[in-house]
Amino acid sequence: GEDVEQSLFLSVREGDSSVINCTYTDSSSTYLYWYKQEPGAGLQLLTYIFSNMDMKQDQRLTVLLNKKDKHLSLRIADTQTGDSAIYFCAEGGSGGSYIPTFGRGTSLIVHP
Amino acid sequence: ETGVTQSPTHLIKTRGQQVTLRCSSQSGHNTVSWYQQALGQGPQFIFQYYREEENGRGNFPPRFSGLQFPNYSSELNVNALELDDSALYLCASSHDREEKLFFGSGTQLSVL
């Protein structure tokens, strides 16, 4: 099965909060990442969390990590149409190698 | 500070041909990672170069090869192209194999 799993689509209304969920399999992962990809572009690192943390907040972004359940979530407050993109969850750091393994991505669609 | 740049942006090849993709790493970065992103999928790790040596390889056949130069720029070479090689090829750079990867915009390769 996939090492990192995400739901494929999420649709929200502008101004609402978005929550994108992810599960991963490697319990020895040191870092969990969220990347954003806009159409025709590469990946932009949004935020990442060290595995010994439960939560990280960065402006409108909140990352929650449940290490016991290997569950990661990204909450975007006050979602804007410019947030429409594909969001990738990734794990890395296992065995000292910081090479992220990515999920398939969640396509976030924000309606006006 | 110059970001990660990749060339060309788009490329069309026929089956059986060979292709070379190029990547210039971000200023101050000595590590380059290459990923393949098929349509609708997450990026798949091909290999990583650190200080001109291969530092890790994903599940790709030997016809995928690479180089890193003394200025830390890198090439990805693919021989005997197959239709399934059609994808977006992403290059990412980092400093000393650290956990934060910075991606270029990618090269879209189409194999006919």
Image (spheres, rainbow, N blue to C red):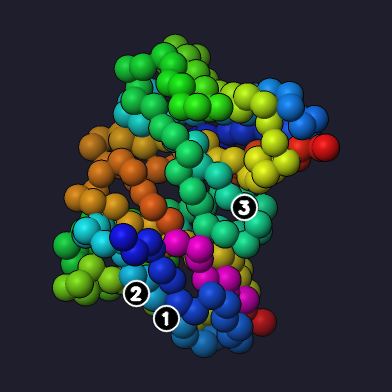
x, y percentage for residue A33?
A: 44, 35
Segment tinted magenta in the rendering: B104-110
Mark 1 to mark 2 CA distance (whole Å): 7 Å
Instruction: Identify the residue position indicated by label 2 in the image.
Output: B75
**B39 or B59: which is nearer to us?**
B39
The answer to which of marks 1 and 2 sits earlier in the sequence is 1
Per the rendering, the mark at residue B20 is: 1
What's the chain of the residue with tag 1?
Answer: B
x, y percentage for residue B39?
A: 65, 58
Indicate which label's residue lies in the foreground, 2 or 3: 3
**B99 or B81: which is nearer to us?**
B99
Asked if the residues shown at circle 1 and circle 2 are in contact, with their CB atoms under 8 angstroms apart, the answer is yes
Against A24, residue B57 (above or below) is below
Instruction: Identify the residue position indicated by label 3 in the image.
Output: A38
Q: Disc 2 marks which amino acid? A: Glu
Against A43, residue B7 (above or below) is below
Mark 3 to mark 1 CA distance (whole Å): 25 Å
Residue that appears at 58% across and 33% down: A5
